[in-house]
Image: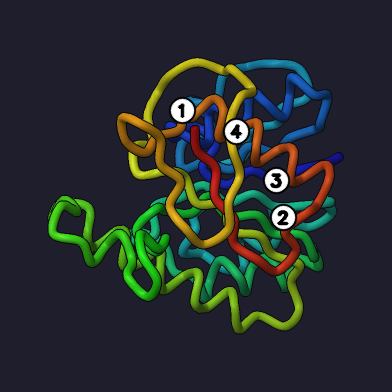
Amino acid sequence: MNVALIGATGNAGARILSELTRRGHEVTAIVRNAEKVPARPRVTARQGDVLDQPGLAALLKGHDAVISSVHFTTSDPEKLIGAVRSAGVRRYLVVGGAGSLEVAPGKKLIDTPEFPAIHKAEAAAGAAFLDRLRQEKELDWTFLSPSAMFVAGERTGKFRLGSDQLLAHATGSSISFEDYAIAMVDELERPAHSRARFTVGY
């Protein structure tokens, strides 16, 4: 496919870029500084601003899908969604957060006493983005939430998928950026969560 990846040099974005190219997709890597995108086959770096809706829409035109991997506190859901819609791209996949996942019926991770205060603003903005997507009528969107610990690690290909509940294992709740990227590109290639949020973890 011809995929536009917004935020291709971040922790998750860089791994998603690698996974896309590993599988032979053509990628337009949209970043603030195009020089930071590593040179590799099938990757075109483009400088873009997530707050410039018309400029971003112009960069997104002609792609089969858009993957967004940007911080929620430094972007605007209306401008991102608006740019994808204006570009005429229907498929929109979003790197989500874990804060809006449930740890018990009606109780979100962000509302637990253990949730780090330093991450609350980003998590709340991510939850608001998900709420906005759930009202979206035009785009075929998917929001993929990681587990609580979203860290650098190995590309194992061994993980579990869930829906709105936080996935946990014997020693906590975690997923590597590398395995998260596999789940994201799997969803791109074989859509199973259209207009829905899902999660990935060990």
Q: Which residue is mark 4?
A: 181
> In terms of secondary structure, where does tag 1 sit?
strand
**Left or right for 193, reference 170:** right
Q: Is residue 24 above or below residue 145?
A: above
**Which of the 4 image quadrants contains residue 25?**
top right
**Residue labelled with disc 3:** 4
Give the Cα distance between marks 4 and 1.
9 Å
Residue at 70% in and 31% down: 44
Whether tag 2 and tag 3 are in contact, CB under 8 A, the answer is: yes
Are the residues at dot 3 and dot 1 in contact (C-beta closer than 8 Å)?
no
**Residue at point 64%, 49% (across, down):** 67
The residue identified by callout 2 is: 60
| CA distance for labels 2 and 4 | 21 Å
Q: Earlier in the sequence, mark 2 or mark 1?
A: 2
Q: Amino acid at mark 1?
A: Ser
Q: Which of the two labelled residues, at mark 4 and mark 3, occupies the earlier sequence position? A: 3
Q: Residue at x 15, y 52 (%)?
A: 114
Find out whether the residues at labels 4 and 1 contact each other: C-beta distance under 8 Å: no
Reply above or below: 155 against 146.
above
Residue 6 screen position, x and y as percent: 57, 47
**Of marks 3 and 1, which one's residue comes earlier in the chain?**
3
**Mark 2: amino acid:** Leu
